[in-house]
Image (cartoon, rainbow, N blue to C red):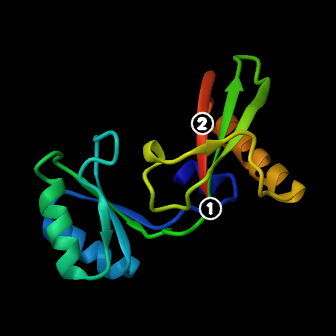
Amino acid sequence: AKAVEHCGYKVAESSCCSTVEEAVEAGKQIGYPVLVRAAFALGGLGSGFASDEQELKALVNQAFVNSPQVIVDKSLKGWKELEYEVVRDASNNCITVCNMENFDPMGIHTGDSIVIAPSQTLTNEEYFRLRECALKVVRHLGVVGECNIQYAV
């Protein structure tokens, strides 16, 4: 998040929490609804949306069964989800291989969603703005090789 912000772009509010109390405080700070995710877990294991403190506590307790930490994120449910595949070499040459768009809006786990490549609903301006962001962030991080950057629009 700090690297993205350093490059001049915004990241949705998020907080890593190790206790139920920390997660409740994060929910209050971020504002409901929130997304609760088990840290270090693939495939959306132990994640879900909470509309209030009671739902948050139930999700957090479930997530702690699989992980020592949870991530509480601002809910972006319903937003458009996009991804750019980027390759950078040691000489700082950087390209976007392709961009992809999830057919389903945010809220449907990426692994359960249809992905369309290249994206079909971005304007030219949006496409190039997201591409520029991806290249800036990858260069800032010094990635050598392939990586991806995901967006909620």
Which quarter of the picture shows residue 29? Answer: bottom left
Horizontal placement of 9 versus 77: left or right?
right
Residue 136 % position (x, y):
73, 43
Residue 148, numbered circle: 2
Q: What residue type is labelled 2?
A: Asn
For the point 23% across and 68% down, which residue is it?
Answer: 23
Residue at 77% x, 28% y is 94
- Give the image quarter of residue 115: top right
Q: Quadrant of the C terminus?
A: bottom right
Q: Residue at x 70, y 43 (%)?
A: 134
Badge 1 crowding class, 10 Å Cα cut-off, few under 14, some 14 to 19, many 20 or more, is: some
Q: Which label was assigned to residue 98?
A: none
Q: How far apart are marks 1 and 2 (CA)?
A: 16 Å
Question: x, y percentage for residue 34?
Answer: 37, 72
Q: Is residue 22 above or below residue 144?
A: below
Residue 100 locus on image (x, y percent): 67, 43
Above or below, comparing residue 121 to residue 31 in the picture: above
Q: Residue furthest right?
A: 124
Q: Which amino acid does label 1 sit on?
A: Lys
Kind of element beneath mark 2: strand
> In this rendering, which labeled residue sits more in front, label 1 or label 2?
1
94 vs 20, left or right, is right
Image quarter of residue 42: top left
Extreme residue in the top direction: 90
Could you tell me which secondary element the residue under label 1 belongs to?
Answer: loop
Q: How crowded is mark 2: few (under 14 residues within 10 Å), some or many (20 or more)?
A: some
N-terminal-most mark, 1 or 2: 1
Residue at numbered disc 1 = 80
Which percent across, then down, holds residue 139? 69, 35
Asked whether the beta carbons under mark 1 and mark 2 sit within 8 Å of each other, the answer is no
